[in-house]
Amino acid sequence: MKAHLIRQKFSTFFIKHDHKKISSSPLIPQNDPTLLFANAGMNQFKDYFTGMALAKNKRAVTIQKCVRAGGKHNDLENVGFTARHHTFFEMLGNFSFGDYFKKEAIHMAWEFLTKELAIDKNKLLITVHESDDEARDIWHNQEGVPLNRIFKMGDKDNFWEMGEFGPCGPCTEIFYDHGEKYSDGNYDPNFPLKDEGRFVEIWNLVFMQFEKTSEGIKKLPKPSVDTGAGLERLTAAMQGVYWNYDTDLFQGIIKEIEKISQKSYGDKK
Ligand code: GLY
């Protein structure tokens, strides 16, 4: 499936579920001195989460241009070394501003991935925050994910913050299994996700409930949802390739560079 169709399917699916399509914000955040570049889809909605502004529509869907080359979410050291990190990328996101919460967010994510995109359920693994039995129960009882495919993780992996300050909350992530061939040698049957080569995070649902300020952490006026799903990673999974660079998002550019440089992709010299 071509990347443009994944973008289209994502928007159409969430519009069908009453989300308002909003354009990506510019890469340079407007009126936000806490960020140099947009690092996630939720940035432009920060004031809706904190209650500083009222959202006209309580549900939104976006495809956000992001840069993660500095600050809290700095991927720079990984770029070129892993199959899945970029400085610039596109993030798919559906958002609830005090509207739906865990049950609906998990249901829509699962339905989109396993029905709309028809990804094999057996290739997906789930993580939840170690304190979030509710999310674990929803994955298991509502969506039928076996408990041995749901893993509890601590704050380092499953508590998402926009930056030093801003909205934050525990999250649940969906990982895609690219198969044994891509193992980095750390596979452990009790905790497969240790194998960061084989398993790639493709979807992050943040259950926004707090705000970090210079005075400390406080509760948000209403629990909300912020999704971050990397288009390039999802496209790699859908196109049966491991490196994001092997998807149609990059191959057109790479082919042109091959022509201009007279070198072939993969040529080490
Ligand atoms: N805002 C959620 C994420 O970037 O993963």
Image (cartoon, rainbow, N blue to C red):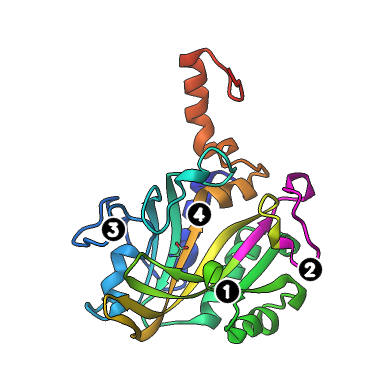
Residue located at (52% from left, 81% from top) = 102
Q: Where's residue 140, x and y in %?
A: 69, 80
Q: Residue 229, image x and y in percent? A: 50, 59
Tell me, yes or no, whether the two marked residues, 4 and 3, touch with CB atoms within 8 Å.
no
- The residue singled out by tag 3 in the image is 35
Q: Secondary structure at mark 3?
A: loop
Q: Nearer the viewer, residue 244 or 100?
A: 244
Q: List the residue tagged with mark 1.
A: 154
Left or right? Give the position of 179 relative to 154.
Answer: right
Q: Which contiguous range is marked in magenta?
A: 174-192
Q: Nearer the viewer, mark 1 or mark 4?
A: 1
Q: Amino acid at mark 1?
A: Gly
Whole-number angstrom distance, CA of label 1 to CA of label 4 = 22 Å
Q: Nearer the viewer, mark 4 or mark 3?
A: 3
**Disc 2 beta carbon < 8 A from ligand 1?**
no
Q: Which residue is mark 4?
A: 230
The magenta stretch spans residue 146 = no
Three-letter amino acid code of the residue under disc 4: Gly
Label 1 – label 2 distance at C-alpha: 17 Å
Q: In the rendered structure, which disc, 2 or 3, sits on the residue that comes first in sequence?
A: 3
Helix, strand or loop at mark 1? loop
Q: Residues within 10 Å of mark 1 (few under 14, many from 20)?
A: few
